[in-house]
Image (cartoon, helix red, strand yellow):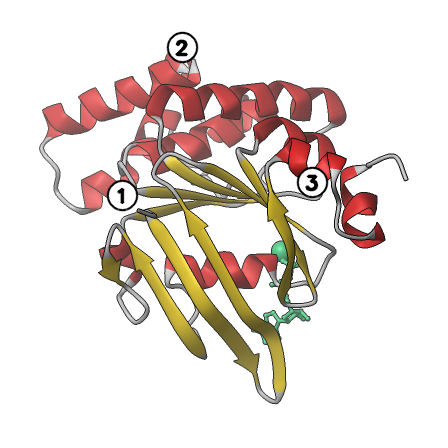
Amino acid sequence: MSFLSIDRVTKQFGIVQVIKGVSIEARKGEFIVFVGPSGCGKSTLLRMIAGLEETSGGTIAIDGEDVTHADPARRHIAMVFQSYALFPHLNVFDNIAFGMQIKKVPRAEIRSRVEEAARILRIEPLLDRKPRQLSGGQRQRAAIGRAIVRKPKIFLFDEPLSNLDAELRTRMRVEIARLHQAIGATMIYVTHDQVEAMTLADRIVVLRNGLVEQTGSPSELYDRPRNLFVAGFLGSPR
Ligand code: ADP
Ligand code: MG
């Protein structure tokens, strides 16, 4: 039984159809990676899953519930972007706590959720710092902390590491794998980086021009790419 079910979803901007009928199923706890060239529709798909963009056709169901036209708030999804957009005047604790403070979650509950997220992300010593006192990787962790405390059913990551230098990207990739292990949530992760795709994914979805080109485990796609396009993306020997 799939936890996230995307069924023949389309998206039209004006007269241009950018998503042309995409179907993807994800099991609970699965780590799915979307890869594909710039402009193929990866971000648009994530935004439709999150409810930040209306679908033009097809259906999206989460945990058995049709959410195709549901408010973002009702989908229990958290999205992490590459620009971490932390509030510069708030310390890390308050940045992570912000959404809960707005919703008037009791203070003790806020504290325990922030501390738990900080523990998972190993940023406990940084909770008093302002964003400008953090490295790029630490800021990215604080941004992920904001997602964790919401206890989402699904995490969506849109190229979260692409602003980081190569060394930090490697370290954060390991952190994200650890995060997935620690909380076991369903994750959908968009990347340009072949190493990220191959090492993080339970399953890779290769997108091309608004369609799914091929889907499979990293080793399936690496060993049996359907065509040169897929092979080129995953660095298969061809
Ligand atoms: P990716 O994330 O794979 O780079 P996007 O999902 O951002 O691709 O974009 C897919 C296509 O949809 C691109 O051709 C882009 O120009 C177009 N597009 C995205 N958002 C809009 C929009 N709000 N209005 C019109 N066209 C858009
Ligand atoms: Mg994008």
Spatial distance from mark 2 to mark 3, Cα to Cα?
Answer: 41 Å
Q: Residue furthest bottom?
A: 15
- Residue at 47%, 70% in the rendered image: 9
Q: Quadrant of residue 148?
A: top left
Q: Which mark is residue 125?
A: 2
**Residue 205 visible in the picture:** no
Q: How many marks?
A: 3
Q: Which mark is residue 221?
A: 3
Residue 114 in picture, x, y percent from top left: 27, 24
- Residue at 71%, 30% in the rendered image: 195
Q: Quadrant of ligand 1?
A: bottom right
Label 1 secondary element = helix
Q: Quadrant of residue 160?
A: top right
Q: Amino acid at mark 1?
A: Gly
Label 3 secondary element = helix
Spatial distance from mark 1 to mark 2, Cα to Cα?
Answer: 21 Å
Q: Quadrant of the C terminus?
A: top right
Left or right, 225 with reference to 187: right
Q: Earlier in the sequence, mark 1 or mark 2?
A: 1
Callout in the foreground (3, 1): 3
Label 2 secondary element = helix
Q: Earlier in the sequence, mark 3 or mark 1?
A: 1
Q: Which mark is residue 99?
A: 1
Left or right, 195 with reference to 96: right
Left or right, 201 with reference to 50: right
